[in-house]
Amino acid sequence: MDLDAIDRRLLAALQENGRLTATELAERVGLTASPCLRRLKRLEQSGVIRGYAALVDQERVGLPVSVFVSVKLERQREDALETFEEAVRRCPEVMECYLMTGTRDYLLRVVVRDLSAYERLLKETLTRIKGVASIESSFALAQVKHANALPIG
Protein backbone atom coordinates (compact mmCIF):
# COMPACT_ATOMS: atom_id res chain seq x y z
CA MET A 1 0.00 0.00 0.00
CA ASP A 2 1.34 3.42 -0.95
CA LEU A 3 1.27 5.88 1.93
CA ASP A 4 1.08 9.58 1.21
CA ALA A 5 2.19 12.37 3.55
CA ILE A 6 -1.22 12.56 5.26
CA ASP A 7 -1.27 8.80 5.88
CA ARG A 8 2.20 9.05 7.39
CA ARG A 9 1.16 11.94 9.66
CA LEU A 10 -1.92 10.00 10.69
CA LEU A 11 0.17 6.93 11.57
CA ALA A 12 2.76 9.03 13.42
CA ALA A 13 0.02 10.71 15.48
CA LEU A 14 -1.60 7.39 16.36
CA GLN A 15 1.73 5.83 17.30
CA GLU A 16 2.32 8.75 19.64
CA ASN A 17 -1.16 8.56 21.17
CA GLY A 18 -3.58 5.81 20.12
CA ARG A 19 -6.39 7.33 22.18
CA LEU A 20 -6.81 10.49 20.10
CA THR A 21 -10.41 11.26 19.23
CA ALA A 22 -11.38 11.49 15.56
CA THR A 23 -11.52 15.27 15.87
CA GLU A 24 -8.08 15.50 17.50
CA LEU A 25 -6.61 13.16 14.92
CA ALA A 26 -8.13 15.13 12.04
CA GLU A 27 -6.72 18.38 13.45
CA ARG A 28 -3.24 16.85 13.76
CA VAL A 29 -3.16 15.70 10.14
CA GLY A 30 -4.89 18.72 8.62
CA LEU A 31 -8.20 17.15 7.58
CA THR A 32 -11.80 17.29 8.68
CA ALA A 33 -13.15 14.33 10.65
CA SER A 34 -14.92 12.47 7.80
CA PRO A 35 -11.98 12.14 5.36
CA CYS A 36 -9.69 11.42 8.31
CA LEU A 37 -11.93 8.55 9.44
CA ARG A 38 -12.09 7.19 5.88
CA ARG A 39 -8.30 7.13 5.71
CA LEU A 40 -8.11 5.51 9.13
CA LYS A 41 -10.58 2.80 8.10
CA ARG A 42 -8.59 2.17 4.88
CA LEU A 43 -5.36 1.81 6.88
CA GLU A 44 -7.08 -0.62 9.25
CA GLN A 45 -8.69 -2.69 6.47
CA SER A 46 -5.44 -2.92 4.50
CA GLY A 47 -3.60 -4.22 7.57
CA VAL A 48 -1.24 -1.24 7.91
CA ILE A 49 -2.85 -0.69 11.31
CA ARG A 50 -3.03 -4.14 12.90
CA GLY A 51 -4.79 -3.11 16.09
CA TYR A 52 -4.69 -0.91 19.16
CA ALA A 53 -3.17 -1.69 22.54
CA ALA A 54 -2.16 -0.18 25.87
CA LEU A 55 1.57 0.01 26.59
CA VAL A 56 2.14 -1.63 29.97
CA ASP A 57 5.24 -1.02 32.07
CA GLN A 58 6.76 -4.48 32.59
CA GLU A 59 8.44 -3.55 35.87
CA ARG A 60 5.28 -2.12 37.42
CA VAL A 61 3.40 -5.34 36.69
CA GLY A 62 6.09 -7.46 38.34
CA LEU A 63 8.04 -8.63 35.26
CA PRO A 64 11.32 -6.71 35.58
CA VAL A 65 13.65 -9.33 34.07
CA SER A 66 14.26 -9.37 30.31
CA VAL A 67 16.16 -12.31 28.85
CA PHE A 68 17.37 -12.68 25.28
CA VAL A 69 17.46 -16.34 24.38
CA SER A 70 19.34 -17.75 21.38
CA VAL A 71 18.18 -21.18 20.28
CA LYS A 72 19.86 -23.61 17.93
CA LEU A 73 17.85 -26.51 16.55
CA GLU A 74 19.22 -29.95 15.74
CA ARG A 75 18.00 -29.53 12.15
CA GLN A 76 16.55 -26.69 10.13
CA ARG A 77 13.84 -28.76 8.49
CA GLU A 78 10.40 -27.30 8.00
CA ASP A 79 8.74 -29.65 10.47
CA ALA A 80 11.35 -28.82 13.16
CA LEU A 81 10.85 -25.08 12.59
CA GLU A 82 7.06 -25.46 12.80
CA THR A 83 7.30 -27.53 16.01
CA PHE A 84 9.49 -24.93 17.68
CA GLU A 85 7.41 -21.97 16.51
CA GLU A 86 4.14 -23.54 17.67
CA ALA A 87 5.61 -24.26 21.12
CA VAL A 88 6.89 -20.69 21.43
CA ARG A 89 3.50 -19.23 20.41
CA ARG A 90 1.94 -21.02 23.40
CA CYS A 91 4.47 -19.53 25.83
CA PRO A 92 3.19 -16.22 27.29
CA GLU A 93 6.62 -15.22 28.64
CA VAL A 94 8.01 -15.05 25.10
CA MET A 95 7.29 -11.53 23.91
CA GLU A 96 9.09 -11.77 20.58
CA CYS A 97 10.57 -14.57 18.51
CA TYR A 98 12.63 -14.17 15.35
CA LEU A 99 13.92 -16.75 12.89
CA MET A 100 17.54 -15.71 12.36
CA THR A 101 20.43 -16.08 9.98
CA GLY A 102 23.86 -17.02 11.33
CA THR A 103 24.91 -19.56 13.92
CA ARG A 104 21.64 -19.50 15.88
CA ASP A 105 18.20 -20.35 14.52
CA TYR A 106 15.97 -18.24 16.78
CA LEU A 107 16.24 -15.19 19.00
CA LEU A 108 13.60 -14.74 21.70
CA ARG A 109 12.84 -11.90 24.07
CA VAL A 110 11.44 -13.28 27.30
CA VAL A 111 10.06 -11.41 30.32
CA VAL A 112 9.84 -12.98 33.80
CA ARG A 113 9.56 -11.84 37.40
CA ASP A 114 12.91 -13.26 38.58
CA LEU A 115 15.74 -15.68 37.91
CA SER A 116 13.89 -18.67 39.34
CA ALA A 117 10.92 -18.02 37.04
CA TYR A 118 13.29 -18.03 34.07
CA GLU A 119 14.92 -21.24 35.31
CA ARG A 120 11.47 -22.89 35.46
CA LEU A 121 10.64 -21.69 31.94
CA LEU A 122 13.96 -22.99 30.67
CA LYS A 123 13.71 -26.41 32.36
CA GLU A 124 9.98 -27.04 32.00
CA THR A 125 9.33 -25.55 28.57
CA LEU A 126 12.22 -24.46 26.35
CA THR A 127 14.50 -27.46 26.85
CA ARG A 128 11.56 -29.82 26.32
CA ILE A 129 10.73 -28.57 22.84
CA LYS A 130 11.50 -31.36 20.41
CA GLY A 131 14.47 -30.60 18.19
CA VAL A 132 16.21 -28.00 20.39
CA ALA A 133 19.97 -28.59 20.32
CA SER A 134 21.20 -25.73 22.50
CA ILE A 135 20.06 -22.59 24.30
CA GLU A 136 22.08 -19.51 25.28
CA SER A 137 20.60 -16.89 27.61
CA SER A 138 21.66 -13.27 28.02
CA PHE A 139 20.13 -11.14 30.77
CA ALA A 140 19.49 -7.47 30.07
CA LEU A 141 21.06 -5.26 32.73
CA ALA A 142 19.34 -2.05 31.65
CA GLN A 143 17.08 -0.93 28.85
CA VAL A 144 18.85 1.86 26.99
CA LYS A 145 16.13 2.46 24.39
CA HIS A 146 12.70 1.05 23.68
CA ALA A 147 10.54 2.36 20.89
CA ASN A 148 7.10 1.33 19.76
CA ALA A 149 6.70 3.88 17.00
CA LEU A 150 8.06 2.89 13.61
CA PRO A 151 10.16 5.57 11.88
CA ILE A 152 7.70 6.06 9.03
CA GLY A 153 8.64 9.73 8.62
Image (cartoon, rainbow, N blue to C red):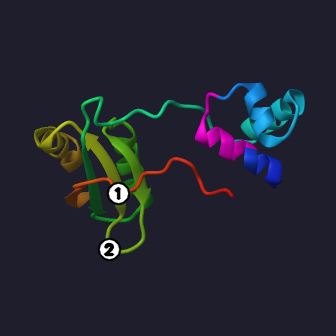
For the residue pair 49 and 31, the one nearer the viewer reads as 31
Give yes or no for residue 11 being in the magenta stretch: yes
Identified at 69% across, 44% down, the residue is: 11
Residues at discs 1 and 2 in contact (Cβ within 8 Å):
no
Identified at 87% across, 37% down, the residue is: 31
The percent position of residue 73, horizontal first and vertical second, equals 29, 62
Q: Is 63 situated above or below 23?
A: below
The percent position of residue 22, horizontal first and vertical second, equals 76, 26
Q: Which residues are magenta?
A: 10-19
Does residue 130 appear in this view?
A: no
Give yes or no for residue 14 being in the magenta stretch: yes
Secondary structure state at the residue bearing disc 2: loop
Q: Is residue 91 left or right of residue 41?
A: left
Q: Residue furthest bottom?
A: 102
Amino acid type at circle 1 is Val
Identified at 40% across, 40% down, the residue is: 89
Q: Which residue position holds label 2?
A: 103
Amino acid type at circle 2 is Thr
For the residue pair 119 and 4, the one nearer the viewer reads as 4
Foreground: disc 1 or disc 2: 1
Determine which of the numbered discs, if any, sits on residue 144 in the image: 1
Label 1 to label 2: alpha-carbon separation: 26 Å
Q: Residue furthest left?
A: 116
